[in-house]
Amino acid sequence: MADGITIAFGPLGPVGHGDIVLFVGDDLALSPTVAQALGRGAADLLARAAASERFKGKSLTSLALPAPAGIDADRLLVIGLGSEKDRAKIDWPALGGYAASKVSGRQAHVALDWPGSSVSPANAADFALGARLRVYSFDRYKTKKKPEGEEARVTALTLMVADPSAAEAASKVSEAVAGGVLLARELINEPPNVLYPEEFARRAEELTKLGVEVEVLGPGKLEALGMGALLAVAQGSTREARVVVMRWNGGDDASEAPIAFIGKGVCFDSGGISIKSAGGMEDMKGDMGGAACVVGTMFALASRKAKVNAIGAIGIVENMPDGNAMRPADIVTSMSGQTIEIINTDAEGRLVLADVIWHVQSAYKPKFMIDLATLTGAIIVALGQDIAGMFSNDDALAAKIAAASEATGEAVWRMPLIPAYDKAIDSKFADMKNTGGRHGGAATAASFIKRYVNDVPWAHLDIAGVAMSSSPSEINRSWGAGWGVRLLDRLVRDNYEA
């Protein structure tokens, strides 16, 4: 069970029971409002405690001390903001996540005020977003009871700001985005015996409660559509494939072309006949991180009633090595009619994406397409586990994604697409082969996907490094990161809503 959190907004001033969280720079100065609320002795108490504990007010450091006499609170938690330069570029979600981690399971009043501060409603909403994301944990399968009194730990925050009503209104958006991120994390963290293609599709169907139109395509429909590449991946598993198409029609004109997000959803990837090594194979339950991000993004857009028409499409399969599994040297025919020689059955995600991308652009004529996939280990070698690789055929779309990346901190780095990478996937026996060899593996994989994109702006995000088991941060301590939901939501908000 994940720890819970409640967040409310209130005015700056006197507080009741619980902790008081306040912020200081490296000069340890309190704002006049906070100093007045805490009383005359607070500043002196802070100075003496800071000297004793060698607290310098550095960014994301903290000092806990008993509340001064006359204050109806349990303790003061002082959080450092660093130098004046640091305070000019605060990462608000990270600050909210750090603060939430220091008052986990407690009631706290958080004074978002310090000398020279100008905390906007959007800043407060981002602070709340970070707090919501930080308290998440995935432990529903642990049967050992927690110590007495810890069964239902709820972190209750009251954010004290200059304009509580405006901050609360802004927070409705951040709460929707947080819900999408947490949904994506839940999907990625689930074990593969629980979250297989049919169950994944069922969970995506729950978005109908938010007004999303959801269509689930089963094996018969997929065969009728000619999705031979996707079905080839699934044929080695007893779990049948699904494609789920989610439509959110929030734009003023329902007939306006939608934007489209497409996700790879390999619920478990054994590698198939080209089986992976045993070490770390358990992580392949997360090979559906792209599909999880798309579902989470559609949740966020619908929850906040985004004024945009959007398509979310996911191809959901298992890649298993039974007697019916596809083999190296097989040739399969994709929905586009192009043929593919299978060189390595572990290069399966691109086969799934090829058919889903072709279906989306053919059926829905989108303004642009962005696919997300835990596609290659090569991108981790290139960029590590903190940055996703971005490939695109459109400079304007790439620039918008990069701007959303900068705004959210979900980092992307544009990678090259050149003719040599495309030539590397030419086949002697079919139109193409499904791998271009070891060198430039992320780029040749992107070139493969590009062959299924017509005259549509398109970007491919290889999220193998960031979707799961990524570096811990102030807003995430989960194995499944839910990476990409904040990025895509910001892209939509900044560029595509009326």
Image (tube, grey):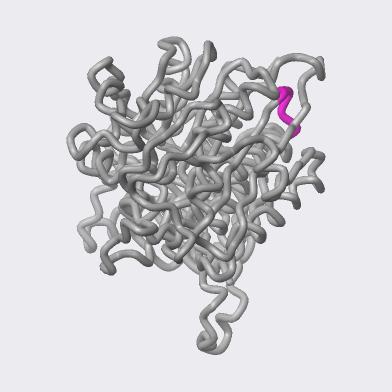
The image position of residue 460, as x and y in percent, is 43, 29
Q: Is residue 308 magenta?
A: yes
- Image quarter (top left, top right, bottom left or bottom right) of the C terminus: top right
The answer to whether residue 333 of the structure is visible from this angle is yes
Identify the residue at image location x=71%, y=56%. Answer: 202
Identify the residue at image location x=21%, y=32%. Answer: 440
The image position of residue 438, as x and y in percent, is 19, 39
The answer to whether residue 160 of the structure is visible from this angle is no
Specify the principal SS of the magenta part.
Answer: loop
478 versus 393 height, above or below: below
The answer to which image quadrant residue 271 occupies is: bottom left
141 versus 100 height, above or below: below
Identify the residue at image location x=71%, y=28%. Answer: 306
442 and 108: which is toward the camera: 442
179 and 436: which is toward the camera: 436
Q: Is residue 82 left or right of residue 65?
A: left
245 and 62: which is toward the camera: 245
246 and 209: which is toward the camera: 246
The answer to which image quadrant residue 3 occupies is: bottom right
Please give the range of residues in magenta.
Answer: 305-309
The image position of residue 114, as x and y in percent, is 44, 38
Q: In this view, does 268 lie to the left or right of 176?
A: left
Identify the residue at image location x=41%, y=15%. Answer: 393
- Image quarter (top left, top right, bottom left or bottom right) of the N terminus: bottom right
401 versus 23 height, above or below: above
Q: Is residue 328 magenta?
A: no
